[in-house]
């Protein structure tokens, strides 16, 4: 949540050169959400102390339709599989081939609305294709055909080098997965890693990419969402990316959905970043308000965009953070047990925060009005942390998410 409202400040459609004779072909081909276009000469990438420069991808095999290296797992395949017709898929493959080979002019053979929709699917799901900076439609004066004109911000060598560095970073993250982890644990691990290791950044030209999130560790919402999707792919967890806008400010936004136990859930890593004030005081704090939530929760402050197609419905609760952690409170009598569950689960993993959620505003107000940092309940939890795990803690709380009936515990280790 650091600088939350600027998470997609770079979102804008690039300028369209309107040299069209037919109004039907005049389409603004919005390809970039949360993006700041730019390029760097002489890219030199560092990943875990190892440099990757243009040309290093020669040691890797390129894909069949691209002149640059595309690592395994950098394709998310929800919209293409579920929403495109066989004819659309043929167009999709042709466009992907054009982009993969840096073609600059291509004859437009489909309606511009179809082109726009498929370009959006490619933007969302082809995670390694981040090299396009601009595109428009114009008339070829000699043939009188409409052509798609593409401009690129990176060469094939540069894209390969950045994908190699991103793959290395992802492999290091995947090494943190243990045999005891189920899919929920893996998703929480990916979520927590990105919150703790990546910061919101509106200046980096690659804040919309996996490279920005995992290598530079600076990203906007698009970079967070694509990095999370990539890690899910590597873990074999079905997922998709969702686009929309924030309700109060109408700022374009991007986040994830994952499928677990037969149900879909929303995950918004960007909005689970604490804001600057809380982060400055407690830099290791992680929030879970938007981790594994339903449509009804996400719609409190997100408007879901149904383009290029409606995303899946999210109605399940079993894998929600508060349910899984035993931190869902329906009565005052449940408060102590829920707090103890959440805090001890966090202490077991040496985390600095835990959250509990109340079923109603009245219940939240009734319980929190009686709380104090030295309450008997807190002392009991501190004693359990020491007896169960041999760990001494200080325990405080904040009403950071008061409007959502959430109490956030801050855990300090002593």
Image: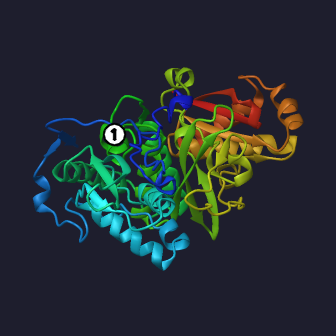
SS label for mark 1: loop
Q: Is residue 282 left or right of residue 335?
A: left
Q: For mark 1, what is the residue?
A: 206
Q: Quadrant of residue 208?
A: top left
Q: Quadrant of residue 354?
A: top right
Quadrant where the N terminus is found in the figure: top right
Q: Is residue 40 visible?
A: yes
Between residues 172 and 145, which one lies in front from this camera angle? 145
Q: Residue at x 40, y 70 (%)?
A: 91
Q: Is residue 278 left or right of residue 104?
A: right
Q: Residue at x 71, y 46 (%)?
A: 299
Where's residue 381, x and y in %? Answer: 68, 37
Query: How many residues crowd around disc 1 within 10 Å: few (fewer than 14), some, or many (20 or more)?
Result: many
Between residues 16 and 358, which one lies in front from this camera angle? 16
Q: Residue at x 47, y 72 (%)?
A: 88
Where's residue 101, x and y in %? Answer: 22, 61
Q: Is residue 182 visible?
A: no
Q: Residue at x 16, y 44 (%)?
A: 50
Q: Which coloring applies here?
A: rainbow
Between residues 168 and 205, which one lies in front from this camera angle? 205
Where's residue 211, x and y in %? Answer: 32, 45
Q: Is residue 137 left or right of residue 3?
A: left
Q: Is residue 291 above or below residue 276?
A: below
């Amino acid at each position: 949540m650091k600088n939350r409202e600027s998470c997609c400040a770079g979102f804008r459609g690039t300028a369209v050169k309107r040299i069209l004779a037919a109004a039907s072909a005049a389409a603004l081909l919005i390809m970039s959400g949360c993006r700041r276009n730019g390029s760097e000469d002489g890219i030199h990438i560092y990943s875990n102390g190892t440099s990757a420069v243009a040309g290093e991808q020669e040691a890797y095999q390129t894909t069949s339709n691209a002149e640059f290296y595309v690592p395994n797992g950098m394709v998310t395949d929800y919209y293409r599989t579920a929403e495109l017709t066989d004819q659309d898929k043929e167009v999709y493959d042709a466009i992907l081939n054009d982009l993969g080979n840096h073609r600059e002019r291509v004859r437009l053979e489909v309606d511009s609305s179809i082109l726009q929709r498929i370009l959006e699917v490619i933007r969302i799901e082809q995670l390694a294709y981040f090299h396009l900076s601009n595109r428009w439609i114009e008339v070829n004066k000699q043939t009188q055909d409409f052509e798609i004109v593409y401009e690129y911000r990176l060469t094939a060598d540069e894209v390969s080098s950045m994908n190699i560095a991103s793959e290395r970073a992802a492999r290091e993250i995947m090494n943190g997965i243990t045999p005891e982890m189920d899919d929920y644990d893996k998703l929480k691990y990916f979520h927590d890693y990105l919150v703790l290791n990546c910061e919101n950044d509106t200046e980096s030209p690659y804040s919309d990419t996996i490279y920005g999130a995992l290598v530079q560790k600076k990203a906007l919402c698009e970079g967070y969402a694509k990095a999370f999707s990539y890690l899910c792919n590597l873990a074999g967890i079905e997922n998709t990316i969702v686009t929309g806008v924030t309700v109060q400010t109408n700022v374009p936004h991007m986040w994830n959905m994952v499928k677990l136990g037969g149900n879909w859930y929303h995950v918004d890593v960007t909005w689970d970043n604490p804001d600057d004030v809380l982060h400055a005081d407690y830099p290791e704090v992680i929030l879970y308000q938007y981790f594994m939530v339903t449509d009804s929760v996400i719609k409190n402050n997100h408007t879901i965009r149904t383009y290029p197609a409606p995303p899946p419905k999210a109605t399940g609760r079993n894998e929600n953070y508060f349910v899984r952690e035993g931190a869902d409170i329906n009565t005052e009598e449940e408060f102590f047990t829920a707090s103890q569950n959440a805090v001890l689960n966090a202490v077991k993993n040496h985390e600095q925060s835990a959250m509990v959620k109340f079923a109603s505003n009245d219940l939240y107000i009734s319980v929190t009005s009686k709380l104090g940092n030295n309450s008997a309940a807190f002392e009991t939890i501190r004693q359990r942390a020491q007896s169960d795990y041999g760990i001494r803690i200080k325990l405080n709380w904040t009403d950071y998410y008061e409007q959502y009936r959430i109490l956030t515990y801050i855990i300090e280790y002593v």
